[in-house]
Amino acid sequence: MENILEIKDLTIQYRADNRIVEAVNQLNLTLGKGESLGLVGETGAGKTTTALGIMGLIPDPPGIVTGGEIIFEGEDLLKQNKKRMRSIRGKKISMIFQDPMTSLNPVMTVGSQIAESIRIHERCSKAEAATKATEMLELVGIPGERYGEYPHQFSGGMKQRVVIAIALSCNPELLLADEPTTALDVTIQAQVLDLIVKLKKEKQTSMILITHDLGIVAEVCDKVAIMYAGEIVEYGSLEQIYNHTCHPYTKGLFGSIPDLDSHVKRLSPIPGLMPDPADLPAGCSFCPRCTCACERCESENPQMIEVETGHFVKCFQIGKEEEHV
Amino acid sequence: MQKAHAETGKTVKTGFWRDAWHRLCKNKGAMLGLFLLLALILCALFAGVLAPYPYDLQDYSHTFEGPSALHLLGTDNFGRDILSRIIYGARISLLVGFSSIITAIIVGGLLGAISGFYGGRVDNALMRAMDILMSIPGMLMAISLAAAMGPGLANMVIAIAIADIPGYARVVRSSVLTIKDQEYIEAAQCIGASDSRIILRHIIPNCIAPIIVQATLGMAGAILSASSLSFLGLGIQPPTPEWGSMLSAARQYIMNYPHMCIFPGVAIMITIFALNMLGDGLRDALDPRLKN
Amino acid sequence: MSKYIGKRLLMMIPVLLGVMIIVFTINFLTPGDPARMILGDGATPEALAQVTEELGLNDPYLVQLGRYIGNVVFKLDLGESYMTGKPVFEEIASRFPTTVKLAIFSVSISVLVGVSAGIISATKQYSIFDRIATSFSLLGVSMPTFWAGLMAVLIFSVKLGWLPASGSYGPEYWVLPSFTLGLHSSATVMRMTRSSMLEVIRADYIRTARAKGQKEKWVIITHALKNAMIPVVTVIGMQFGGLLGGSLLIETVFAIPGLGKYIIDSISTRDYPVVQGGVLLLAISFSLVNLLVDILYAYLDPRIKSQYKAAKKKKGGAKNAESTC
Amino acid sequence: MSELLRVEGLKKYFKTPKGQLHAVDGVSFSIEKGKTLGVVGESGCGKSTLGRCIIHLLDTTDGKIFFEGKDITNIRKEDLKESRKDMQMIFQDPFSSINPRMTVKSIIMEPMVIHNMYGGDKAKQEEKVLEIMDTVGLARRLADSYPHELDGGRRQRIGIARALALEPKFIVCDEPVSALDVSIQAQILNLMQDLQEERGLTYIFITHDMSVVKHISDDICVMYLGTLVEKCPADKLFEKQFHPYTEALLSAIPVAKVGARRERILLKGEITSPINPEPGCRFAPRCLRAKPECFRKQPELKELEPEHFVACHLY
């Protein structure tokens, strides 16, 4: 399959008060055309930063992309000039943000916010853009009459639908959805997820879904990447990650969520806390919390190993097990 | 950073005020302001030692003299040394600024706290009254009060304080309201804390920071108002040295002896500048959330 | 919208009544015998008693207050000047336009300079322009108005001889006072605009606009500006109050025969009816300006407008589900 | 088994400019000693208000609350302070629920000081604080730290320690883990279960997270717009639901298993306003199976199967 996006050794730092925070650390990731990738991790793992990096929207200062490549349809996004990036943003790659409450401009009508995106990328008159924006509204399940209303007149779920309409208005090739349903109630979340999946299929868009919810990933994605402290620690197909979990962190994540179907009396959480991103451990960043860490893990950062076709794990212990077998 | 310390077990003593002080120390502008302010306070306290001449020593052989080695900032129409008068003037300005702000904060803060804590009708009545007071521009209010009460230090302090009260009432009310919404107030009710304990232990310590910032910036405003009143002849009366009234007297000589007009104004400016810098710095230091 | 304006107008009534009560009470408490002021020092006790009786000064406070408010509201009668014996209303009405003219000139300068400098400073944070503008504004807010006026006279009239120092006989006489007042208050407007702009630029919806591929210039103009102006408008309204107060000082410094100087002169001649009337007129103008500000506010912020619309159509309530948790 | 808390027809209305907001509208249930009652529902369903009414942070509009058989609905102020020793609360937001100007030690000690525990002996209280810190898994060296130095998980442990300081019998937990990351959430959930076992605590566990509520509760109440729509033992609820809202709610939960996707029931529209609600079932406007009757009369809670109560006209 053709790859639409290839990220190689991407490193993004935030610099403030003589402190360097490695938000994204030598990240590698590939996404095939039409695929949905779930990028899973906890707060501070660097998921959003990665997405903003792809969009070229890292706030500078304090953020700096210090190295790596982001190859999208054959061109390195990090080498493009501002004008070229603008023509890619919103047209070829677009993003749905986490908080629908704050991601819409409170003093502009929702219709004009959708139309704006159309006007930027497509040669059309104001009236044509408005017609298309109304269509987009209806597509995401909002009556077209509400074109002239303001964001505060919409509920959270409705606002997120508007954000989706903006993101999909120019039929992007790649959609970055950053926790699109975290701020919503379960039943509304189900509606919005259904909408995203439906539209993605219709428009054959590739997608990176950023979330901390392994349940959502299981329902929506084909590929999964688990992120910890700015790195991908495990990557593979949905089946590989969920049924042949390898990395101790991924195992810990699964052990932490209560299961609806079986009855477990106690959860088995990961001990300890996420390391301070300004002061990462020398070796494997998960080592201080890992139950099966050895001396080597403390001093040396493991490389990604392919344990089966398309299933990569960043852990020394996995290699060992293989050897023993 | 602190998390890391907690993690590694290094016990670094931190506290809200200590942290705020460290942040303030990093702010060059605020440090400059603090330094200037301390210098002014020293001037005011030790005016008798620092001033080269008594403030009311008249020397008719040396009137209207420009700056010289003998009189660093020159002399005025009575031959009095301007530098000495400015140094003594710091006393009045700081005194007026400080006492009117303290009065305004105590009265306004109390009204605002009552309004915010009890809410409902009390709040409504108090806030409407404040709206009315605020619909008269502060300077105009101070001028009419000063005009009604007549000149003098105490009257000036009262006039400025009254004009400032509604502003403080609003600031304190809004911070009390914000704090009242926090879950830790509910938590305190849950463990059976009395109203007075909640106010004293939980609300006041948390709204002191914005009040300090307001007070610093407000003191600058009060000193400006004081000098304006004196300039209009409604505040401190000659021969007491006050920067505003010095300017008022100097005005008629501006054509020929501009030095009389320049230096007292510079003194006012330095004071206000110092307080503004310190106030801005305090705001950043006391509210780390604002600074990203 | 008209309902909103109507409500604001109604709300002004108690405020204006309150202002009248305050102004009257301050005057009531002022020591000094009005009868003696009118008749002069040589007056006989009988004459004094007669005038006191005629003016109703023996009546209780509330009676006098009621009479005062009745006279002001129904007859526009503010009493007579002790000095000239003419109705105060005529005296102040003839001088008021001068003060209004000065205030309008200065507010225009203040808004023009303050808002544009604030916007440029915020969009180019830490640039040379920003540093210079912030330093100037800091000096500006630290300067007393009257001293700034004196320095302007010293430089432009005494030293350079470009502009007249005092009086009001032609357009050139307006330059120094308007610029002194205007530039002085522009310092505050600039600081507010800058900080409000900086806050808005960091908002999520600005990121959304950038993610659409919008040009930075348009992001600022169409998205940031209107939102940033909401708090600035309030500050401009407050500044207008400051300018009315400042006009007392500036008119005195530049010897402009406006209402401000008239009030100050009347204070020194103890012509209290004039002071009372003048202060009342200035306070009323300030209230009217605040009314304008509120209307402008509703225009800028659709959330305020729709509060009034929602009450009209019942549907609005159901749409915006209230959260109670 | 003995009953610890019983709530009968609890109502809480708020006055708003637009009308009466029916936050909680006639909720009844009881909890047995040492058990956990889970209360689930989406935002705006009144679950937090319910918790705050029980703990007397809010006055109740109507209805009765019995604690250990005593009616505590309109308890006198002096008695309320005493009853605080038995009933405590753990809050949702680990950041706003503890006073930023107090040290960890003084936060945990405050309830002991207020209630003059251990005869007001300071040393004894301090010792007790350290003991509680051990219990909730806070290192003793953190006693003099300020909250802002600590992460969300540790702050939530402080909140739990404060609630434990009075050695209560009953704790209302208002979304205690929803602000935390999954790995930390699991740590806190385990801690709460351990405490329950050791101390025989009784919990009301308020949350919007179905998997958490299933994990921790013995019984579950499902709320919708201020009303209780379904109540039954936790395991049973996930096997069989009667109320259409519960069905939809459960089907909407994404399951972290490959191919586990269930038939999803998508509700139409969004939650309606709790202000001056129309008569009839609150869920009727969104219900896929609503009958004309549903819009006329509010359904009563009926016991359809042993221990399984449902408020719906369909049954």
Image (cartoon, coloured by chain):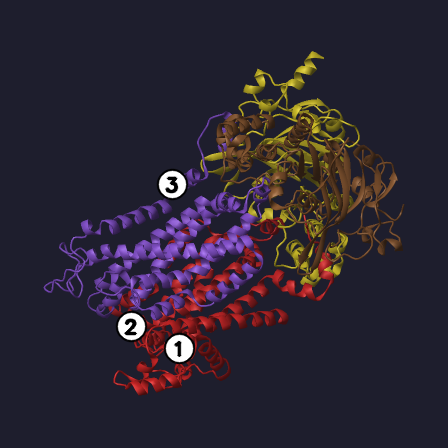
Chain colours: A yellow, B purple, C red, D brown
Which quadrant of the figure contains the N terminus of chain A? top right
Q: Amino acid at mark 3?
A: Cys
Q: Is residue A198 above or below residue D2?
A: below
Which quadrant of the figure contains the C terminus of chain A? top right
Please, what secondary structure does the residue beneath circle 3 have? helix
* Chain bearing mark 1: C
Quarter of the image where one finds residue C55? bottom left
Callouts 2 and 1 in the same chain: yes
- A141 or D139: which is nearer to us? D139
Image disc number at residue B25: 3
Q: Nearer the viewer, mark 2 or mark 1?
A: 1
Q: Residues within 10 Å of mark 2 (few under 14, many from 20)?
A: many
Q: Is any atom of residue B101 visible in this view?
A: yes
Q: Is residue A111 above or below residue B282?
A: below
| Of the image marks 2 and 1, the number of the one nearer the N terminus | 1
- B210 or C51: which is nearer to us? C51
| Residue, disc 1 | C98
Q: Amino acid at mark 1?
A: Thr
| Residue drawn at x 58%, y 72% as measured from the top left | C10
Quarter of the image where one finds residue D133? top right
- For the residues labelled 2 and 1, the Cα–Cα distance comes to 17 Å
How far across and down, in percent of the image, does residue B183 sit? 59, 43
Q: Is residue D49 above or below residue B166?
A: above
Q: Amino acid at mark 2?
A: Ala
Please, what secondary structure does the residue beneath circle 1 have? helix
* Chain bearing mark 2: C
Callouts 3 and 2 in the same chain: no
| Residue, disc 2 | C165
C157 on left or right of D193: left
